[in-house]
Image (cartoon, rainbow, N blue to C red):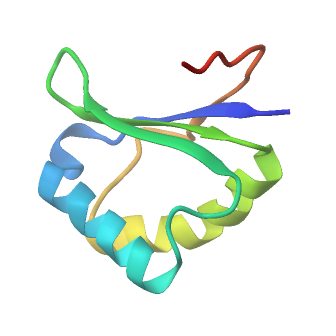
Amino acid sequence: MSILVRFSPTGNSATPERYDETVRRLRESHGFPPAGLEYHVAFRDSAGDLRVSEIWDSREQFETFGQRLMPVLTEMGIQLSGEPEVLEIHNIIKR
């Protein structure tokens, strides 16, 4: 079952520069995008804070990648406001 994962970093911990550097490090050292990641979208919410939403093929693939992701986020000083929100997807329509 596919899942939607939403990350909410705290305050200014996820600047565009820190986000870009995190993606660069993931690409160089861990392979990015990882197996199972269908979509990755980074955007600013109405308050101007950076948010990330992803669609994964399975929760297990997301959790496996999370073990590689969290140390990189820590190195970059990016803190999450809590556990990522994980929602089961009922349907996906692509153009």
Name the residue located 13 percent from the left edge and 58 percent from the top edge: 17
Say above or below: 28 vs 78: below
Q: Is residue 32 left or right of residue 24?
A: right
Q: Count numbered badges in the picture.
A: 0
Q: Is residue 58 left or right of residue 75?
A: right
Q: Is residue 64 left or right of residue 51?
A: right
Name the residue located 59 percent from the left edge and 21 percent from the top edge: 94
Across and down, in percent, residue 20 comes to 23, 60
Name the residue located 61 percent from the left edge and 60 percent from the top edge: 66
Say above or below: 58 vs 43: below
* Quadrant of the snapshot with the N terminus: top right
Across and down, in percent, residue 34 comes to 60, 64
Across and down, in percent, residue 33 comes to 53, 62
Q: Is residue 2 left or right of residue 1?
A: left
Camera-side residue: 48 or 89?
A: 89
Q: Quadrant of residue 74?
A: bottom left
Q: Residue furthest bottom?
A: 29
